[in-house]
Amino acid sequence: MKLSLVIPVLNEAEALPLLFQAVFPVIDSLDCDCELLFVNDGSTDDSLDILARAAEADPRIKVLSFSRNFGHQAAITAGIDFSTGDAVVVMDADLQDPPRLIPEMVRLYREGYDVVSPQRIARPGDKWLKRQAITLFYLLMRKLVDKRIPPEVGDFRLLSRNAANAIRRFREQHRYMRGMIAWLGLREVMLPFERQARAGGETKYPFSKLLRLSWTAICSFSALPLRLTMWLGLATSSFGVGYLCWAIYMDLVRNRAIWGWTSVVSLQCLFFGVTLVCVSLIGDYIARIYEEAKQRPLYVVNQAVNIDEAPQDTGRAIFLAPRRAENTIHANRI
Ligand code: UDP
Ligand code: MG
């Protein structure tokens, strides 16, 4: 059996040496071949140099480097595209996904599971607000969007070759890997663990980026926001009709016309506000359709180390790296 570790990297110069220290004893203890596929997602620090040096010393380390930052989800996608193992483990470079779980994940894979999902039972490394927001997000996702999405499971996953090949067929631009894996409906098992704080460096997921990913998750897997606009429209219209009835009643029965610029203006603001929110929600979906319709590549690989060849059957990606094995960085730009 061969195991591929896919590790996306954005400015992880501090964490990488610690990762090497932690991960090698674990993979050396496994009775299978291993490859470590690092995807450098446009790092601006020394990450790429560190990875290239490590790859020169150890052919099990393979490095793909993007021409710029294409995002975490694109980096995972590229790693899975290039992986050659019978099973693929996707993990962070910052040791928040502990390598010590890998032997247990491999054991469960050998028992026949297609997806092994470490589930966070605690996340002391994250701030309180982030933890609460994430709990709320999973609650909403499971209740309103897709109940198959397991709570507190991140991108730290083991995928069988079948699952990885299935994921490679998803070439959508707005990607939410956790949703895609849940959508496949393959045989999955949870593995509880306590998520630690980062080994070094800063999180690359500030709150704003997390919100954007959550929004992508919701929009990619449901038309719920569009349906909500209908309910919002119905609610505000009912309120408008109620207000009108009250105004007529006051005028005809109580003989007291409601006068007021204030009420007219505030109602107008309310209705225009609601209308604009609804239109912009529809606009967001249209923008996403537009971006999908362009069929742009998901990422551009312009450097690679220890990669024998680019995968043959992968659409929507650009590989500018030469297709031969050499322990040097190939800077083969357009
Ligand atoms: N990452 C990446 N591209 C990005 C953001 C993050 O490749 O645009 C990598 C990052 O280096 C790390 C992993 O993806 O290895 C997860 O990011 P991070 O640990 O910052 O997220 P968090 O664990 O804080 O949610
Ligand atoms: Mg992390």
Image (cartoon, rainbow, N blue to C red):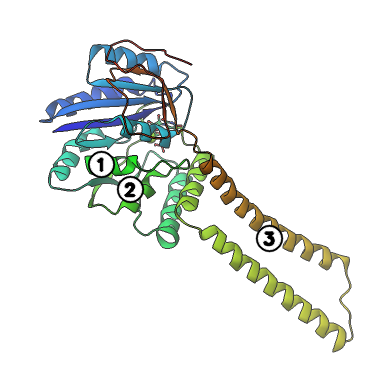
Q: Does the rendering let one see residue 95? A: no
Whether the residues at callouts 1 and 2 have beta carbons within 8 Å, the answer is: yes
How many other residues sit within 10 Å of disc 1, few (<14), some (14-19) or many (≥20)?
many
- The N terminus: image quadrant: top left
* Disc 2 C-beta below 8 A from ligand 1: no
The residue sitting at 21% across, 32% down in the picture is 85
Dot label at residue 191: none
Q: Report x, y in % for residue 247.
A: 81, 79
Residue where numbered disc 1 is placed: 159
Residue where numbered disc 2 is placed: 181
Task: Give the mark, 1 or 2, whose residue is nearer the N terminus.
Answer: 1
Tell us which disc is closer to us: 3 or 1.
1
Q: What residue type is disc 3 on? A: Val
How many other residues sit within 10 Å of disc 3, few (<14), some (14-19) or many (≥20)?
some
Q: CA distance from mark 1 to mark 2?
A: 9 Å
User: Please, what secondary structure does the residue beneath circle 1 have?
Assistant: strand
Q: CA distance from mark 2 to mark 3?
A: 35 Å
Task: Give the mark, 2 or 3, whose residue is nearer the N terminus.
Answer: 2
Residue where numbered disc 3 is placed: 274
Q: Report x, y in % for residue 322.
A: 35, 16
Task: Give the mark, 3 or 1, whose residue is nearer the N terminus.
Answer: 1
In front of the other: 283 or 45: 283
Q: Does the rendering let one see residue 253? A: yes
